[in-house]
Image (cartoon, rainbow, N blue to C red):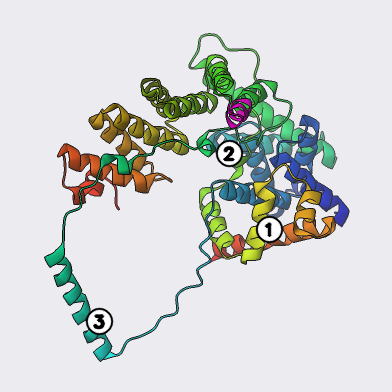
Amino acid sequence: MSTSNKKDIYGSIQRYIQGQLSEEEIEALWVEFAKDPTLLDRLEIEVGVKKIIQEGMAPSHSKGAKLLFLNNWGWHAAAAVAILLVAVVQVFRVDTPTQLSEFIITGIPLDQVETTDGIRSKKEMVVLEADSLMNLGFAALVNDNKEQALSLFNQVIASYDEEPYASKAYLNRGIIHFNDGVFESAVEDFIEAAERASDNRMISEKAYWYLANTYVNTGQLEKALEAVSEAYKRDGVFRKPALLLYQKLSYDLGNVDYEQAPASLGEKE
Amino acid sequence: MDYPKFVTAVLENDRKQLNEFSEVLTRVLIKFLLVRLDANPADAQDCAQNTLMLVIDKIRANKLNNPDSIIYYLFTTAKNDYLKLVAKHRESHFEEVPDTHIAPADQLENILDKERQSILKKCMELLKPKQLKYISYWFEHPDNDASVVAAHFKISVNNAWTKKHRILQVLKDCVQKKLQQ
Protein backbone atom coordinates (compact mmCIF):
# COMPACT_ATOMS: atom_id res chain seq x y z
CA MET A 1 0.00 0.00 0.00
CA SER A 2 1.39 3.43 -0.94
CA THR A 3 2.16 6.01 1.76
CA SER A 4 -0.45 8.44 0.47
CA ASN A 5 -3.07 5.68 0.38
CA LYS A 6 -2.24 4.76 3.96
CA LYS A 7 -2.47 8.42 4.95
CA ASP A 8 -5.93 8.58 3.36
CA ILE A 9 -6.97 5.52 5.31
CA TYR A 10 -5.67 7.01 8.57
CA GLY A 11 -7.72 10.10 7.72
CA SER A 12 -10.77 7.90 7.17
CA ILE A 13 -10.17 6.13 10.48
CA GLN A 14 -10.12 9.48 12.22
CA ARG A 15 -13.33 10.57 10.52
CA TYR A 16 -14.90 7.19 11.34
CA ILE A 17 -14.15 7.78 15.03
CA GLN A 18 -15.60 11.28 14.73
CA GLY A 19 -18.79 9.84 13.18
CA GLN A 20 -18.17 11.75 9.96
CA LEU A 21 -18.24 8.86 7.47
CA SER A 22 -21.23 7.94 5.36
CA GLU A 23 -22.41 4.32 5.25
CA GLU A 24 -20.66 3.77 1.91
CA GLU A 25 -17.42 5.21 3.25
CA ILE A 26 -17.64 2.99 6.33
CA GLU A 27 -18.16 -0.07 4.13
CA ALA A 28 -15.19 0.93 1.99
CA LEU A 29 -13.07 1.36 5.10
CA TRP A 30 -13.99 -2.12 6.32
CA VAL A 31 -12.86 -3.49 2.96
CA GLU A 32 -9.50 -1.83 3.66
CA PHE A 33 -9.47 -3.47 7.10
CA ALA A 34 -10.09 -6.83 5.43
CA LYS A 35 -7.25 -6.21 2.98
CA ASP A 36 -4.85 -5.08 5.71
CA PRO A 37 -6.02 -6.29 9.14
CA THR A 38 -3.16 -4.42 10.89
CA LEU A 39 -5.22 -1.27 10.24
CA LEU A 40 -7.67 -2.60 12.82
CA ASP A 41 -4.90 -2.25 15.42
CA ARG A 42 -4.65 1.38 14.45
CA LEU A 43 -8.41 1.79 14.83
CA GLU A 44 -8.28 0.11 18.22
CA ILE A 45 -5.42 2.31 19.45
CA GLU A 46 -7.19 5.48 18.29
CA VAL A 47 -10.51 4.52 19.87
CA GLY A 48 -8.68 3.49 23.05
CA VAL A 49 -6.67 6.71 23.30
CA LYS A 50 -9.78 8.77 22.66
CA LYS A 51 -11.66 6.93 25.40
CA ILE A 52 -8.85 7.34 27.93
CA ILE A 53 -8.53 11.05 27.18
CA GLN A 54 -12.29 11.59 27.33
CA GLU A 55 -12.48 9.81 30.65
CA GLY A 56 -10.12 12.46 31.94
CA MET A 57 -6.76 10.81 32.09
CA ALA A 58 -4.63 12.42 34.72
CA PRO A 59 -1.11 11.33 33.90
CA SER A 60 1.13 11.19 36.87
CA HIS A 61 4.44 11.53 35.03
CA SER A 62 6.16 10.47 38.20
CA LYS A 63 9.57 9.23 37.31
CA GLY A 64 9.92 7.44 40.66
CA ALA A 65 11.22 9.15 43.74
CA LYS A 66 14.90 9.11 44.47
CA LEU A 67 15.47 6.96 47.54
CA LEU A 68 17.58 8.41 50.31
CA PHE A 69 18.76 6.09 53.04
CA LEU A 70 19.21 7.06 56.67
CA ASN A 71 21.96 5.62 58.78
CA ASN A 72 21.19 3.92 62.12
CA TRP A 73 21.29 6.97 64.37
CA GLY A 74 19.09 8.79 61.88
CA TRP A 75 16.40 6.10 62.18
CA HIS A 76 16.52 6.25 65.99
CA ALA A 77 16.22 10.03 65.99
CA ALA A 78 13.32 9.93 63.52
CA ALA A 79 11.50 7.32 65.60
CA ALA A 80 11.97 9.39 68.76
CA VAL A 81 10.57 12.51 67.07
CA ALA A 82 7.58 10.52 65.77
CA ILE A 83 6.79 9.13 69.25
CA LEU A 84 7.07 12.60 70.75
CA LEU A 85 4.75 14.03 68.11
CA VAL A 86 2.14 11.32 68.70
CA ALA A 87 2.24 11.99 72.43
CA VAL A 88 1.83 15.75 71.93
CA VAL A 89 -1.05 15.26 69.51
CA GLN A 90 -2.82 12.92 71.96
CA VAL A 91 -2.52 15.45 74.78
CA PHE A 92 -3.75 18.41 72.78
CA ARG A 93 -6.30 16.62 70.58
CA VAL A 94 -9.69 18.31 70.35
CA ASP A 95 -12.58 16.65 68.51
CA THR A 96 -13.66 18.87 65.64
CA PRO A 97 -17.34 18.35 64.84
CA THR A 98 -18.13 18.21 61.14
CA GLN A 99 -21.34 19.25 59.41
CA LEU A 100 -23.15 17.03 56.91
CA SER A 101 -23.23 19.96 54.51
CA GLU A 102 -19.43 19.73 54.23
CA PHE A 103 -19.79 16.33 52.57
CA ILE A 104 -22.36 17.09 49.91
CA ILE A 105 -22.34 19.07 46.72
CA THR A 106 -24.15 22.38 46.44
CA GLY A 107 -24.68 22.24 42.68
CA ILE A 108 -23.95 19.99 39.72
CA PRO A 109 -21.66 21.53 37.11
CA LEU A 110 -22.71 21.48 33.46
CA ASP A 111 -19.86 19.20 32.47
CA GLN A 112 -21.70 16.44 34.29
CA VAL A 113 -24.59 16.63 31.83
CA GLU A 114 -24.57 13.59 29.58
CA THR A 115 -24.38 13.90 25.83
CA THR A 116 -24.00 11.09 23.33
CA ASP A 117 -20.58 9.93 22.34
CA GLY A 118 -20.78 10.64 18.63
CA ILE A 119 -19.10 7.36 17.68
CA ARG A 120 -21.81 6.57 15.24
CA SER A 121 -22.34 6.31 11.56
CA LYS A 122 -24.11 9.14 9.81
CA LYS A 123 -26.95 7.33 8.18
CA GLU A 124 -28.66 5.64 11.09
CA MET A 125 -31.42 8.19 11.42
CA VAL A 126 -33.29 6.43 14.21
CA VAL A 127 -30.35 6.62 16.52
CA LEU A 128 -29.14 9.95 15.24
CA GLU A 129 -32.34 11.73 16.17
CA ALA A 130 -31.96 10.67 19.79
CA ASP A 131 -28.29 11.70 19.64
CA SER A 132 -29.26 15.08 18.28
CA LEU A 133 -31.96 15.65 20.87
CA MET A 134 -29.51 14.86 23.66
CA ASN A 135 -26.88 17.16 22.25
CA LEU A 136 -29.41 19.93 21.58
CA GLY A 137 -30.53 19.60 25.18
CA PHE A 138 -26.97 20.04 26.33
CA ALA A 139 -26.53 23.05 24.03
CA ALA A 140 -29.71 24.60 25.43
CA LEU A 141 -28.38 24.17 28.96
CA VAL A 142 -25.06 25.74 28.03
CA ASN A 143 -27.06 28.68 26.66
CA ASP A 144 -28.94 28.88 29.94
CA ASN A 145 -32.21 27.81 28.34
CA LYS A 146 -33.37 25.29 30.94
CA GLU A 147 -36.95 25.14 29.70
CA GLN A 148 -35.86 24.11 26.23
CA ALA A 149 -33.35 21.62 27.65
CA LEU A 150 -36.07 20.05 29.80
CA SER A 151 -38.40 19.83 26.84
CA LEU A 152 -35.71 18.12 24.72
CA PHE A 153 -34.83 15.62 27.43
CA ASN A 154 -38.57 14.95 27.92
CA GLN A 155 -38.79 14.25 24.20
CA VAL A 156 -35.96 11.71 24.42
CA ILE A 157 -37.67 10.02 27.37
CA ALA A 158 -41.00 9.89 25.52
CA SER A 159 -39.68 8.76 22.15
CA TYR A 160 -36.55 6.72 22.90
CA ASP A 161 -37.30 4.48 25.81
CA GLU A 162 -34.08 2.57 25.25
CA GLU A 163 -30.51 2.58 26.43
CA PRO A 164 -28.27 4.52 26.56
CA TYR A 165 -30.64 7.40 25.80
CA ALA A 166 -33.32 7.08 28.46
CA SER A 167 -30.96 6.79 31.44
CA LYS A 168 -28.92 9.75 30.21
CA ALA A 169 -32.03 11.86 29.61
CA TYR A 170 -33.37 11.06 33.10
CA LEU A 171 -29.98 11.84 34.60
CA ASN A 172 -29.82 15.19 32.82
CA ARG A 173 -33.35 16.06 33.88
CA GLY A 174 -32.44 15.16 37.45
CA ILE A 175 -29.40 17.45 37.28
CA ILE A 176 -31.60 20.37 36.15
CA HIS A 177 -34.10 19.70 38.96
CA PHE A 178 -31.30 19.36 41.52
CA ASN A 179 -29.75 22.67 40.50
CA ASP A 180 -33.20 24.28 40.67
CA GLY A 181 -33.76 22.88 44.15
CA VAL A 182 -36.74 20.77 42.97
CA PHE A 183 -35.47 17.81 44.94
CA GLU A 184 -38.59 15.61 44.80
CA SER A 185 -38.44 15.53 41.00
CA ALA A 186 -34.67 15.10 41.08
CA VAL A 187 -35.07 12.02 43.30
CA GLU A 188 -37.50 10.43 40.82
CA ASP A 189 -35.22 11.14 37.87
CA PHE A 190 -32.04 9.90 39.51
CA ILE A 191 -33.75 6.68 40.65
CA GLU A 192 -35.01 6.09 37.10
CA ALA A 193 -31.55 6.82 35.64
CA ALA A 194 -29.81 4.50 38.11
CA GLU A 195 -32.20 1.62 37.47
CA ARG A 196 -32.09 1.94 33.71
CA ALA A 197 -28.31 2.21 33.67
CA SER A 198 -27.76 -0.90 35.76
CA ASP A 199 -25.35 -2.17 33.08
CA ASN A 200 -23.57 1.14 32.74
CA ARG A 201 -21.27 1.64 35.69
CA MET A 202 -20.45 5.26 34.89
CA ILE A 203 -24.02 6.50 34.53
CA SER A 204 -25.38 4.48 37.44
CA GLU A 205 -22.55 5.72 39.68
CA LYS A 206 -23.36 9.31 38.78
CA ALA A 207 -27.08 8.75 39.32
CA TYR A 208 -26.57 7.15 42.75
CA TRP A 209 -24.10 9.81 43.87
CA TYR A 210 -26.46 12.64 42.94
CA LEU A 211 -29.40 10.71 44.38
CA ALA A 212 -27.58 10.46 47.71
CA ASN A 213 -26.90 14.19 47.65
CA THR A 214 -30.56 14.89 46.85
CA TYR A 215 -31.75 12.69 49.71
CA VAL A 216 -29.51 14.59 52.12
CA ASN A 217 -31.21 17.77 50.93
CA THR A 218 -34.65 16.27 51.58
CA GLY A 219 -33.54 15.00 54.99
CA GLN A 220 -33.95 11.30 54.07
CA LEU A 221 -30.64 10.22 55.50
CA GLU A 222 -31.26 6.45 55.57
CA LYS A 223 -32.06 6.53 51.87
CA ALA A 224 -29.05 8.76 51.25
CA LEU A 225 -26.90 6.15 52.98
CA GLU A 226 -28.25 3.39 50.72
CA ALA A 227 -27.71 5.47 47.58
CA VAL A 228 -24.21 6.56 48.50
CA SER A 229 -23.19 2.98 49.23
CA GLU A 230 -24.34 2.07 45.71
CA ALA A 231 -22.26 4.93 44.30
CA TYR A 232 -19.23 3.80 46.31
CA LYS A 233 -19.55 0.18 45.16
CA ARG A 234 -19.29 1.26 41.53
CA ASP A 235 -15.70 2.19 42.29
CA GLY A 236 -15.56 5.15 39.92
CA VAL A 237 -14.76 8.83 40.06
CA PHE A 238 -17.08 9.52 43.02
CA ARG A 239 -15.66 6.70 45.13
CA LYS A 240 -13.74 8.98 47.50
CA PRO A 241 -16.45 11.59 48.20
CA ALA A 242 -18.97 8.74 48.38
CA LEU A 243 -16.92 7.03 51.06
CA LEU A 244 -16.62 10.24 53.07
CA LEU A 245 -20.36 10.91 52.85
CA TYR A 246 -21.07 7.27 53.73
CA GLN A 247 -18.88 7.52 56.81
CA LYS A 248 -20.45 10.78 57.88
CA LEU A 249 -24.00 9.50 57.39
CA SER A 250 -23.20 6.25 59.19
CA TYR A 251 -21.73 8.20 62.08
CA ASP A 252 -24.64 10.64 62.28
CA LEU A 253 -27.19 7.83 62.08
CA GLY A 254 -25.29 5.86 64.71
CA ASN A 255 -25.20 2.84 62.41
CA VAL A 256 -21.57 1.81 62.37
CA ASP A 257 -18.23 2.81 63.69
CA TYR A 258 -16.86 5.63 61.57
CA GLU A 259 -13.63 3.71 60.96
CA GLN A 260 -15.42 0.53 59.87
CA ALA A 261 -17.31 2.02 56.93
CA PRO A 262 -15.34 0.42 54.06
CA ALA A 263 -15.72 -3.05 55.58
CA SER A 264 -19.45 -2.55 56.03
CA LEU A 265 -19.69 -1.63 52.36
CA GLY A 266 -18.24 -4.98 51.49
CA GLU A 267 -15.38 -3.37 49.64
CA LYS A 268 -11.70 -3.17 50.25
CA GLU A 269 -10.41 0.27 50.97
CA MET B 1 -3.83 -10.25 3.90
CA ASP B 2 -2.90 -12.13 0.74
CA TYR B 3 -6.21 -13.43 -0.63
CA PRO B 4 -4.77 -15.25 -3.68
CA LYS B 5 -2.52 -17.18 -1.26
CA PHE B 6 -5.55 -17.88 0.92
CA VAL B 7 -7.38 -19.34 -2.11
CA THR B 8 -4.36 -21.50 -2.92
CA ALA B 9 -4.13 -22.70 0.68
CA VAL B 10 -7.81 -23.70 0.57
CA LEU B 11 -7.53 -25.47 -2.78
CA GLU B 12 -4.33 -27.26 -1.81
CA ASN B 13 -5.63 -27.95 1.68
CA ASP B 14 -2.47 -26.48 3.20
CA ARG B 15 -3.49 -26.82 6.87
CA LYS B 16 -0.70 -24.67 8.28
CA GLN B 17 -1.33 -21.73 5.95
CA LEU B 18 -5.07 -22.17 6.23
CA ASN B 19 -4.93 -21.95 10.03
CA GLU B 20 -2.89 -18.76 9.86
CA PHE B 21 -5.25 -17.11 7.38
CA SER B 22 -8.30 -18.32 9.27
CA GLU B 23 -7.03 -16.76 12.48
CA VAL B 24 -6.55 -13.37 10.82
CA LEU B 25 -9.91 -13.44 9.03
CA THR B 26 -11.79 -14.58 12.13
CA ARG B 27 -10.31 -11.66 14.01
CA VAL B 28 -11.46 -9.21 11.32
CA LEU B 29 -14.96 -10.69 11.20
CA ILE B 30 -15.37 -10.68 14.97
CA LYS B 31 -14.44 -7.01 15.11
CA PHE B 32 -16.75 -6.27 12.20
CA LEU B 33 -19.68 -7.87 14.03
CA LEU B 34 -18.84 -6.26 17.36
CA VAL B 35 -18.56 -2.79 15.90
CA ARG B 36 -20.99 -2.72 13.01
CA LEU B 37 -23.76 -4.89 14.44
CA ASP B 38 -23.14 -4.45 18.16
CA ALA B 39 -22.97 -8.24 18.52
CA ASN B 40 -21.95 -9.78 21.80
CA PRO B 41 -18.51 -11.45 21.75
CA ALA B 42 -19.82 -15.04 21.91
CA ASP B 43 -22.26 -14.55 19.01
CA ALA B 44 -19.59 -12.72 17.03
CA GLN B 45 -17.19 -15.63 17.51
CA ASP B 46 -19.81 -18.20 16.38
CA CYS B 47 -20.86 -16.20 13.32
CA ALA B 48 -17.26 -15.49 12.30
CA GLN B 49 -16.43 -19.21 12.40
CA ASN B 50 -19.59 -20.16 10.47
CA THR B 51 -18.79 -17.53 7.86
CA LEU B 52 -15.28 -18.76 7.41
CA MET B 53 -16.47 -22.34 6.91
CA LEU B 54 -18.97 -21.19 4.28
CA VAL B 55 -16.31 -19.15 2.46
CA ILE B 56 -13.91 -22.08 2.43
CA ASP B 57 -16.66 -24.33 1.02
CA LYS B 58 -17.39 -21.78 -1.72
CA ILE B 59 -13.72 -21.51 -2.65
CA ARG B 60 -13.40 -25.31 -2.73
CA ALA B 61 -16.44 -25.44 -5.03
CA ASN B 62 -14.65 -22.96 -7.32
CA LYS B 63 -17.42 -20.43 -6.83
CA LEU B 64 -15.19 -17.79 -5.28
CA ASN B 65 -11.64 -16.78 -6.06
CA ASN B 66 -11.47 -13.05 -6.64
CA PRO B 67 -10.17 -11.13 -3.58
CA ASP B 68 -12.86 -8.41 -3.79
CA SER B 69 -15.62 -11.02 -4.07
CA ILE B 70 -14.17 -12.91 -1.12
CA ILE B 71 -14.17 -9.79 1.04
CA TYR B 72 -17.70 -8.89 -0.02
CA TYR B 73 -18.86 -12.44 0.63
CA LEU B 74 -17.17 -12.55 4.03
CA PHE B 75 -18.87 -9.41 5.32
CA THR B 76 -22.27 -10.14 3.76
CA THR B 77 -22.34 -13.70 5.06
CA ALA B 78 -21.19 -12.69 8.54
CA LYS B 79 -23.89 -10.03 8.67
CA ASN B 80 -26.64 -12.39 7.47
CA ASP B 81 -25.53 -15.16 9.77
CA TYR B 82 -25.63 -12.77 12.73
CA LEU B 83 -29.07 -11.40 11.79
CA LYS B 84 -30.37 -14.97 11.52
CA LEU B 85 -29.04 -15.65 14.99
CA VAL B 86 -30.73 -12.51 16.34
CA ALA B 87 -34.02 -13.58 14.71
CA LYS B 88 -33.66 -16.99 16.35
CA HIS B 89 -33.15 -15.38 19.77
CA ARG B 90 -36.25 -13.27 19.16
CA GLU B 91 -38.33 -16.28 18.16
CA SER B 92 -37.68 -17.84 21.52
CA HIS B 93 -38.81 -14.67 23.31
CA PHE B 94 -41.65 -13.27 21.23
CA GLU B 95 -44.60 -14.73 19.36
CA GLU B 96 -44.31 -12.29 16.49
CA VAL B 97 -40.96 -11.93 14.83
CA PRO B 98 -40.39 -8.44 13.45
CA ASP B 99 -39.64 -8.66 9.75
CA THR B 100 -37.36 -5.65 9.72
CA HIS B 101 -34.11 -5.10 11.46
CA ILE B 102 -32.99 -1.64 12.44
CA ALA B 103 -29.24 -1.71 12.29
CA PRO B 104 -27.64 -0.18 15.35
CA ALA B 105 -25.15 2.62 14.95
CA ASP B 106 -21.53 1.54 14.90
CA GLN B 107 -20.24 0.85 18.37
CA LEU B 108 -16.56 1.49 18.02
CA GLU B 109 -15.82 1.05 21.69
CA ASN B 110 -16.83 -2.60 21.34
CA ILE B 111 -13.49 -3.09 19.65
CA LEU B 112 -11.68 -2.40 22.91
CA ASP B 113 -10.36 -5.13 25.14
CA LYS B 114 -10.22 -4.44 28.87
CA GLU B 115 -6.71 -5.77 29.39
CA ARG B 116 -5.26 -4.01 26.35
CA GLN B 117 -6.99 -0.80 27.37
CA SER B 118 -5.43 -0.80 30.83
CA ILE B 119 -2.02 -1.46 29.26
CA LEU B 120 -2.63 1.37 26.81
CA LYS B 121 -3.33 3.70 29.71
CA LYS B 122 -0.04 2.73 31.32
CA CYS B 123 1.72 3.31 28.02
CA MET B 124 0.14 6.74 27.72
CA GLU B 125 1.54 7.62 31.13
CA LEU B 126 4.98 6.76 29.78
CA LEU B 127 4.70 9.28 26.94
CA LYS B 128 6.78 12.43 27.14
CA PRO B 129 4.71 15.39 28.45
CA LYS B 130 4.99 17.06 25.05
CA GLN B 131 3.71 13.95 23.26
CA LEU B 132 0.83 13.55 25.70
CA LYS B 133 -0.10 17.21 25.32
CA TYR B 134 -0.09 16.83 21.56
CA ILE B 135 -2.15 13.66 21.34
CA SER B 136 -4.56 14.93 24.00
CA TYR B 137 -5.20 18.03 21.89
CA TRP B 138 -6.12 15.84 18.90
CA PHE B 139 -8.64 13.85 20.85
CA GLU B 140 -9.96 16.63 23.07
CA HIS B 141 -10.93 18.54 19.93
CA PRO B 142 -12.48 15.75 17.90
CA ASP B 143 -14.07 18.07 15.37
CA ASN B 144 -10.79 19.69 14.45
CA ASP B 145 -9.06 18.54 11.33
CA ALA B 146 -5.32 18.28 10.94
CA SER B 147 -4.98 21.88 9.76
CA VAL B 148 -6.45 23.21 13.02
CA VAL B 149 -4.09 21.03 15.04
CA ALA B 150 -1.19 22.11 12.82
CA ALA B 151 -2.05 25.79 13.33
CA HIS B 152 -2.36 25.31 17.08
CA PHE B 153 1.09 23.74 17.35
CA LYS B 154 2.53 25.98 14.62
CA ILE B 155 3.64 23.09 12.42
CA SER B 156 2.76 22.01 8.90
CA VAL B 157 -0.28 19.80 8.24
CA ASN B 158 2.03 17.04 7.05
CA ASN B 159 4.02 17.30 10.22
CA ALA B 160 0.85 17.21 12.27
CA TRP B 161 -0.13 13.88 10.71
CA THR B 162 3.37 12.45 11.03
CA LYS B 163 3.58 13.47 14.67
CA LYS B 164 0.22 11.87 15.46
CA HIS B 165 1.18 8.74 13.57
CA ARG B 166 4.48 8.43 15.45
CA ILE B 167 2.88 8.82 18.86
CA LEU B 168 0.22 6.23 18.03
CA GLN B 169 2.95 3.93 16.76
CA VAL B 170 4.89 4.37 20.02
CA LEU B 171 1.73 3.45 21.93
CA LYS B 172 1.01 0.47 19.69
CA ASP B 173 4.58 -0.85 20.14
CA CYS B 174 4.43 -0.26 23.88
CA VAL B 175 1.14 -2.21 24.20
CA GLN B 176 2.55 -5.02 22.08
CA LYS B 177 5.73 -5.19 24.16
CA LYS B 178 3.89 -5.24 27.46
CA LEU B 179 1.48 -7.91 26.20
CA GLN B 180 4.42 -10.14 25.33
CA GLN B 181 6.06 -9.68 28.76
Residue A65 x %, y %: 45, 75
Residue A157, image x, y percentages: 52, 18
- From this viewpoint, is residue A159 visible? yes
Is residue B65 at least partly visible in the picture? no
The residue under label 1 is which amino acid type? Tyr
For discs 2 and 3, the disc positioned in front in the rendered view:
3
Q: Nearer the viewer, mark 1 or mark 3?
A: 3
The residue wearing badge 3 is: A78
Q: How far apart are marks 1 and 2 (CA)?
A: 37 Å
Residue found at x 16% / y 47%: A257
Residues shaded magenta:
A135-144
Helix, strand or loop under label 3: helix
Q: Is residue A123 left or right of residue A53?
A: right
**Rendered residue at 75%/36% (across/down):** A20
Q: Residues within 10 Å of mark 2 (few under 14, many from 20)?
A: some
Q: Is residue B101 left or right of residue B61?
A: left
Residue indicated by mark 2: B45
Residue A152 found in image quarter = top right
N-terminal-most mark, 1 or 2: 2
Q: Distance between the residues labelled 1 and 3?
A: 45 Å
The residue under the point 63% across, 24% down is B83
Q: The disc labelled 3 sits on which kind of residue?
A: Ala
Which residue is identified by label 1?
Answer: B134
